[in-house]
């Protein structure tokens, strides 16, 4: 397999990353919309407030996704001279989740929303992330989400002659198993806001662990900027008592 793996659409050869990223956004939006209708019968948040929450989440996610990836790859940016191409390249789902979470909390505090608004977004986010990670895998070395070298039989050569951990596929497998677990817990009944907390804690814990298998630059000690962010966020989530505010 040669990377990146271009996908055929009639006469067109499409780069996998933007294509699957667009599919991920579309799938997430569609699922979120349907879940919103399904769970909206007892919703006490009016349409104007919900629009503000959605706008805040989107704005925070964009800022967080770009801000954390810049911090993650700061040494590379210094070597590349902070060109616009380098500054605009890349984003991280961890930063998007953190930025969206913080901004939504600020918006809800400003407009006086005291009920959970996050649970309905967990499965759309989970599915979108899995689709996006497939795009990362098919992109290969360009995406910088691959793992370190490995002698394991399932190591993948992304084009540099080195068999590496396919960390993107590890994440897709984790997300599939995690989705089944969360769905089972949801069917058993959960306090409003707890599904959100479970997903964020579980995903951040996974990223903290799996990123040891990635050749990312150290930010603090042997930890990358993404790992430090996850390590800070997890205890905050675990000690956040007012789960109905998430």
Image (tube, rainbow, N blue to C red):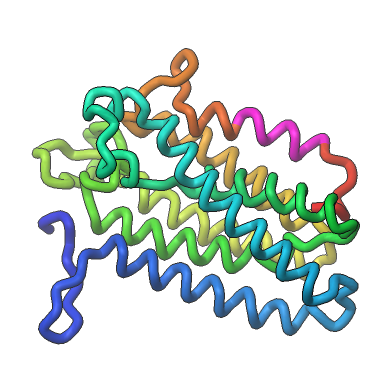
Image location of residue 35, percent across then percent down: 69, 78
Residue drawn at x 47%, y 75% is: 26
Image location of residue 136, percent across then percent down: 32, 54
| In-image side of 229 versus 40 (left or right) | left
Viewer-side residue, 160 vs 53: 53
Image location of residue 232, percent across then percent down: 65, 29
Residue drawn at x 76%, y 53% is: 107
In which quadrant is the N terminus drawn?
Answer: bottom left
Q: Where, by quadrant of the figure, is residue 53 drawn?
A: bottom right
Q: Where, by quadrant of the figure, is residue 191 drawn?
A: bottom right
Residue drawn at x 15%, y 55% is: 3
| In-image side of 186 versus 90 (left or right) | right
Image location of residue 24, percent across then percent down: 44, 68
Furthest-top residue in this view: 221
Furthest-front residue in this view: 84
Furthest-bottom residue in this view: 10
Q: Which stretch appears magenta?
A: 231-239
Residue 45 part of the magenta segment:
no
């Amino acid at each position: 397999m040669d990377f990146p793996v271009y996908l055929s659409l009639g006469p067109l050869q499409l780069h996998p990353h933007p294509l699957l990223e667009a599919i991920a956004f579309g799938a997430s939006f569609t699922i979120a919309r349907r879940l919103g209708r399904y769970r909206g019968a007892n919703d006490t948040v009016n349409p104007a407030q919900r629009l503000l929450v959605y706008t805040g989440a989107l704005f925070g996610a964009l800022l967080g996704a770009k801000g954390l990836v810049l911090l993650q790859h700061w040494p590379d940016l210094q070597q590349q001279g902070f060109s616009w191409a380098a500054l605009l390249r890349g984003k991280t789902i961890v930063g998007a989740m953190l930025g969206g979470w913080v901004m939504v909390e600020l918006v809800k505090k400003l407009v006086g929303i005291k009920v959970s608004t996050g649970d309905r977004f967990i499965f759309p986010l989970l599915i979108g992330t899995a689709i996006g990670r497939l795009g990362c895998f098919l992109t290969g070395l360009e995406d910088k989400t691959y793992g370190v070298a490995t002698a394991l039989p399932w190591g993948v050569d992304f084009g540099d002659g080195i068999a590496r951990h396919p960390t993107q596929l590890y994440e897709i497998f984790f997300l599939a198993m995690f989705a089944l677990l969360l769905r089972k817990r949801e069917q058993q009944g959960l306090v409003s806001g707890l599904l959100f907390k479970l997903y964020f804690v579980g995903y951040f814990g996974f990223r903290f662990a799996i990123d040891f298998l990635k050749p990312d630059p150290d930010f603090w000690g042997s930890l990358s900027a993404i790992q430090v962010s996850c390590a800070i966020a997890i205890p905050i989530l675990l000690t956040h008592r007012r789960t109905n505010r998430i």
